[in-house]
Each structure stands twice: as structure tokens, then as C-alpha cells.
Amino acid sequence: MIPMIEQRRIEAELVRDFYNVLLKSMPKAQAQEIIREAIASSAIRQGKAYAKAVGHTPDLEDFASHSAAWDANNALEREVLHASPERLDYNITRCAYAAMYKEMGLGDIGHLLSCNRDAAFCEGYNKDMELTRTQTIMEGAPHCDFRYRMKG
């Protein structure tokens, strides 16, 4: 299986070309909204596929067990603060995805290509799972604060 960061690099190459074509015919905000919507749709579909592979309605322990896909190739440094079936809190203290998008000249839409996926993934994975995040490295913060909860 290809590491997630490599998959995202391949996707970003395609999205960059698509984004540049969109910018020729519409305002930047409209082009970015199209990218945001398309990436979110992809993340929901990916969440559904991951949930199906679990074989039961997944909880946050199941979700945490899948983090290796995103962490592969030393892509993320994660500080876990709390982990249980109902609550998962962690900070990302280093993000190679952010660095990669900046190197590719996509720093202005990196948050759409990666960060945007996180809450959308929850929709597909388990509709009772919600993410609260107030900051990301991608947008200049010193760390990303992921706070997942199961509703109800």
C-alpha cells in the first residue's frame, strides 16, 4: 500500500493543474470552493471505505488504530493526550504534509488538500464522530489540535 503522504503528493499534482485552469476562468475564492468541495467528497468516500474495512460501526479506538497510514514515512509527529472509544485528543507537532504542499507551491491551498479532509472523513467513517480543531500547522500555528468526540 502506498504511504498516505505519497498518495497526497500524487493527488496534489493533479489538483494543482486543475486549480490553475479554474483560476483562468473564475475568482480565486470560487476556484478554492470547488477544490474544497471535491476534496471533502473524496474524504467522505475514503471514510466510508475505512469504516467498511473495520466490519462494525467504528469508534475512536478503531480510528486511532488507522493512524499509521497517515504517519507512514515519518509524515507526522503526534502527541496523544487522551485515547478512548468516546474521545481522542492529540496534537500534531510536525507535519510533512504542510511542508510538501509549500514545496510544491501549493501552500495557499494546502489546508484544502489535507486539513479540509479531516472533518469530512468523519462523516463517512462514523456520523457520530466529530472533530474540533482550532489551529493547524498548515495555516501557521505551532501545532494542530485534534479533538475528536463521539456524539451522544
Image (cartoon, rainbow, N blue to C red):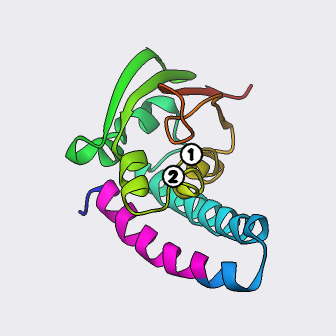
Residue under numbered circle 1:
118
Identify the residue shown where x is 78% and y is 69%.
Answer: 30
Label 2 sits on a secondary structure element that is helix
Task: Identify the mark at residue 114; answer none if there is no mark.
Answer: 2
Determine the residue positioned at 57% across, 55% down. Answer: 108
The Cα atoms of the two marked residues, 2 and 1, are separated by: 7 Å
Closest to the observer: 80 or 65?
Answer: 80
Q: Quadrant of residue 18?
A: bottom right
Give the residues in magenta. Answer: 4-20
Q: Amino acid at mark 2?
A: Ser
Q: Is residue 18 magenta?
A: yes
Q: Quadrant of the N terminus?
A: bottom left
Q: Residue at x 46, y 23 (%)?
A: 91
Q: How many residues crowd mark 1 within 10 Å: few (<14), some (14–19), many (20+)?
A: some
Number of on-image labels: 2
Residue 92 position in % (x across, y down)? 42, 29
Q: Amino acid at mark 1?
A: Asp
The image quarter containing residue 61 is top left
